[in-house]
Image: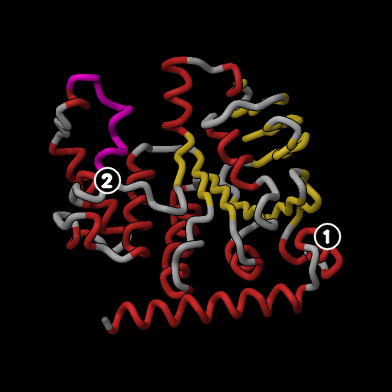
Amino acid sequence: MLELVGLTRRFGHVTAVDSVSLAIPQGQMVGIIGRSGAGKSTLLRLINRLIEPTAGRVVFEGRDVTALRGRALRNWRTDCAMIFQQFNLVQRLDVLTNVLIGRLNHRGTLSSLFKLFSAEERALAIRTLDRFDLAEAALQRADTLSGGQQQRVAIARALMQEPRVILADEPIASLDPRNGKVVMDALRRINREDGLTVLCNLHTLDTARQYCDRIVGMSRGRVVFDGVPAQLTAEMVREIYGMTEDELEAAETVTSTALDTVARAAAAA
């Protein structure tokens, strides 16, 4: 069980996350939705301890994560893997090495420094890439892959950490709809097959409804909705986004069409 207890983060006079309390059972796939600036990304960074809370606690299986320091904190960041919108791959390295980087916290300092990965770790990395149809690209430089492929490499790297929780911060925001579907399919597969808890910030309501067991809606740093997709009424959509569902769908359609046009142009170039 992952628990957030009164979690708060202030930046000066601005409260980015305001007294958020949630209990997330192991193995649940949760979509976090809301407008830009609602506090979604800050919330994930608080859970992973990339930033420190102003108040409140993060508790995992009875352990106070906000009290961890040193090696214990590094271990938590291994247990709680982060996937970013911009992939965060080392572009000049090959795909296999990028995936193996996920093993660094399992190794000693010297072997990590010289990237002395074992044959077993390399075999595991290839198997993990194969789960996402990327084994044939193992020796390619990361910067030769499409955005959707790079994000799947980032997911494979996260799995190499052997995490208990995966936090995905807008993982499809920079992808066209077709690649976005492939990435979301991959996240749902590891949630179902590996039993991992997945918290995913999403910018489209339809994606959250399609893939997530539970949806958390945020507005101005607060949780204003927490329930299953079927409970997300038109009134709640207006409260979360400040617009009707029809207006939101029209905006998402325009964005999706523009991304498709860019993708087709890139493919034709």
* Label 2 CA crowd tier, 10 Å (few <14, some 14–19, many 20+): some
Q: Nearer the viewer, residue 118 or 71?
A: 71
The location of residue 114, given as percent across then percent down, is 15, 28
Say few, some or many: other residues with alpha carbon within 10 Å of mark 1 (under 14 / 14 to 19 / 20 or more): some
The kind of residue on which mark 1 rests is Glu
Main SS, magenta residues? helix
Q: Quadrant of residue 263 in the image?
A: bottom left
Residue 91 is a magenta residue: no
Asked whether the viewer can see residue 21, the reply is no
- Of all residues, the one furthest to the front in this rendering is 12
Magenta residue span: 99-110
Please provide percent x and percent y for residue 209. Answer: 65, 66
Of the pair 34 and 67, the residue shown nearer to us: 34
Q: Is residue 147 above or below residue 62?
A: below
- Secondary structure of the residue carrying tag 1 is helix
Q: Position of residue 145 (x, y in %)?
A: 26, 63
Q: Residue at x 76, y 55 (%)?
A: 227
Label 2 to label 1: alpha-carbon separation: 40 Å
Q: Which residue is disc 2 drawn over?
A: 90
- Kindly identify the residue that appears in the image at 67 percent across and 50 percent down: 37
The answer to whether 116 appears left or right of 32 in the picture is left
Task: Answer whether residue 106 is magenta in the image.
Answer: yes
Can residue 87 be seen in the rendering of this structure? yes
Give the position of the C terminus as an image quadrant.
bottom left
Which amino acid, mark 2? Val
Q: Position of residue 196 (x, y in %)?
A: 50, 45
Q: Which residue is mark 1?
A: 239
Compared to residue 78, the image places residue 193 above or below, namely: below
